[in-house]
Image (spheres, rainbow, N blue to C red):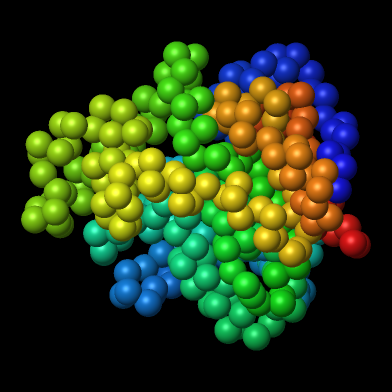
Amino acid sequence: MPILKSSYNPKFPFKNGHFSTIYSSKFRPVPQLLQHRERLVLPDADFLDIDWSYSQGNSSKVAILLHGLEGNAQRTYIVAQAKHLVNDGWDVAAVNFRGCSGEPNLSFQSYNAGKTDDLEAVVKLVLDKNKYNEIALVGFSLGGNLLLKYLGERDTFPKEIKKAVAISTPVSLRGSLESLNKLSNWMYRKSFLIKLREKYKVKMNDFPEKMSHLDYKKITTLLDFDNVYTAPAHGFKDAYDYYEKNSSLQFLPNITIPVLILNAQNDSFLSSECYPIQLATEMKNLYLEIPKYGGHVGFHQSNLRYYSEERALKFLNEVF
């Protein structure tokens, strides 16, 4: 498909990528939304939690929402997207990845940008309810990469999955890391690192034979964290092996359902590889929209209305 022309044109100061990113993450009020938690026991006896929100009536369609790095289902961007969907007649299953729901997970593994077996378990749980004939996947940042990899790495997946939307998505994980390492991104990098180090320290108490204070002290960058924990915990040689095998860019050509990738041009988390323009012009199922503004998950129009939320809903309701 051709590259989609974007109509998003925010007011000043939301034309500034850093302002829109920070405001949307830290200062946008969280909408009111009822969530009902369900615990999913995974095949390896670990767990993750799903926060459900329901539309009025008995909906036959559901959207599975996937958060970003160190996010959860209570983050403003998840709740706001869920509220838009619920108001339009969708049920919503907002996933908290392992260890992200306020309680440490049980296994040495946690979550990562390519751990699609956990998403597969969520899809199975949703299907087992025997009430949904349409499933949409909506992912943000890391969650966007996860859903694109899920859709592209499998020969088949449930026919009920009709469409997907990936917002502010680092389809090249190494490229995104290199972008985050730029001096202008020091604040985001530091925030992520503080949270990841805290989780490592907690998990170290449960797995002293696999984790140590010496390794903990080695974690001074995001690359260090992936080398010290993410890669070995999930079966990769090192961080770069993890990035290479889990970047969704390589899986995009195999996707067979309509997907929208919405990546702002001024998203400082993304590298040039995260805008697959050539692929989008060659594929019939890949819709790529690159607004000039929006930062990272920061497509502000008003506190109640974000362009990304309305755009995702419109795409899911379109007939292809």
Q: Would you say 277 lies left or right of 295 here? A: right
| Residue 3 position in % (x across, y down) | 84, 39
Q: Residue at x 62, y 36 (%)?
A: 274
> Does 276 appear above or below 187?
below
Q: Residue at x 66, y 48 (%)?
A: 166
Residue 212 seen from this side: yes
* In the rendered image, the vertical position of residue 97 relative to residue 192, given as above or below: below
Residue at far right of view: 319
Q: Can the viewer see residue 303 in this picture?
A: no
In this view, 225 is above or below 90: above
Comparing 252 with 260, the one in front is: 252
Q: Looking at the rendering, which quadrant does residue 186 occupy?
A: top left
Please state, as top left, top right, bottom left or bottom right, where the C terminus lies in the image. Answer: bottom right
- Left or right, 19 with respect to 282, comes to left
Q: Position of residue 171 (x, y in %)?
A: 58, 43
- Percent across and percent down for residue 301 are 77, 30
Residue 291, horizontal then vertical, whole percent: 77, 30
- Please give the name of the residue rendered at 84% of the width and 55% of the height, measured from the top-left corner: 284
Nearer-the-camera pick, 254 or 226:
254
Q: Residue at x 24, y 59 (%)?
A: 108
Q: Is residue 125 left or right of residue 190?
A: right
Nearest the eye: 210 or 232: 232
**Which image quadrant is residue 306 in?**
top right
Residue 268 shown left or right of residue 16 in the figure:
left
How many marks on residues? 0
